[in-house]
Structures are given as structure tokens and as C-alpha cells.
Image (tube, rainbow, N blue to C red):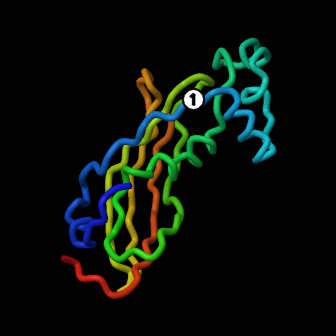
Amino acid sequence: MTARIPVGELERRVGGEIGVSRWFAIDQARIDSFADVIDDHQFIHVDPERARRDSPFGGTIAHGFLSLSLLTAMGEGVLPEIAGQAMVINYGFDRVRFLAPVKSGARVRARFVLSGADRRSERELVARYAVTVEVEGGGKPALAADWIILTLLEEQVEAA
């Protein structure tokens, strides 16, 4: 868990890198479990032999939405907590691009840059993060997204 910082400190960090997550293993078991949850069993994800034979990837790859869904876990311990926060809500994305496949057996991590921090009201702070998901040893990011996080504050918090 990261230390809680005042809203003003977050605002001063706009434009800077906030941090990089730990590595996450993307093995076939994780891909198969995700396929079951979202009911997407396309062979490029769940059939290693056919994917090796009939796809351009040489084996199975993770669903793009699997990489996207890991952003919350990747942000844990990296994204700052705001002093006086009551709740943090995944508010959405302005842009998501899947740029390169994540092959089964790869490891990924996320790099977070704070691109905006704006008070929407006395109790609401909207933070925007430019996120890239890197594949270990890969030359191109697997994913690039503009992620919006809404923080609800307990009470009026000074900008400090």
C-alpha cells in the first residue's frame, strides 16, 4: 500500500511517471480461466496446438481484455492514495488500444503516467492516467490506454 498524499501533491505530479507495477505471469491457465469467465473460447486463446498451426502468433495469446482487466491489480501499490479518500471508482477509459499480442507464458507489467488531476467538486477528484502494458522482452507495448479514476473524498480536503 502506498502512502496517502494530499490532493495538491497529486496535482503537482501531473505529467510525470507515477510508477511501474510488478510483473504478472500470463500463463495458459490464466488465459483459460478468463476465457471461461467472458465466454470467449476462440482457438487463438484456448487451443495451443491449433493456435501454433493456424495462427500467425505461433501459439495461444491472451485476450486483450485480460490485459486490460489486470490494470486494477497492476495499479495496486503503484497508484497514489489520496488523503481523505472515501472510495475509488474505476470511471472508465477515453482510449484503449491493443498494440501487440501477449503470448501464453509471457509476463506483463504496467507503466503509469499521470496525465490529469482535476477537482470535479469538493468531494470528487478525477485522475487520468496514460497507461502502457509492457511485455517482458517485447519491443512494443501490448496495450495503451487513457484510464480515468474517480476518487470520492470524505469531506472537503485542502489542496495542500
Looking at this view, is 101 or 149 the one in front?
Answer: 149
Residue at image x 51%, y 68%? 89
Q: Quadrant of the N terminus?
A: bottom left
**Mark 1, other Cα within 10 Å: few <14 / some 14–19 / many ≥20:** many
Decide: is 104 above or below 31: above
- Count every numbered label the image shows and give the total: 1
Identify the element where label 1 is drawn.
loop
Residue at image x 73%, y 27%? 44
Disc 1 marks which residue? 102
| Residue 11, percent from left and from top | 24, 67
Looking at this view, is 118 or 109 the one in front?
Answer: 109
| Residue 35, percent from left and from top | 75, 39
Left or right of 20 on screen, residue 27: right
Left or right of 68 on screen, residue 6: left
What amino acid is found at the position of numbered circle 1 in the picture? Val
Decide: is 86 above or below 41: below
Residue at image x 46%, y 44%? 144
Q: Quadrant of the C terminus?
A: bottom left
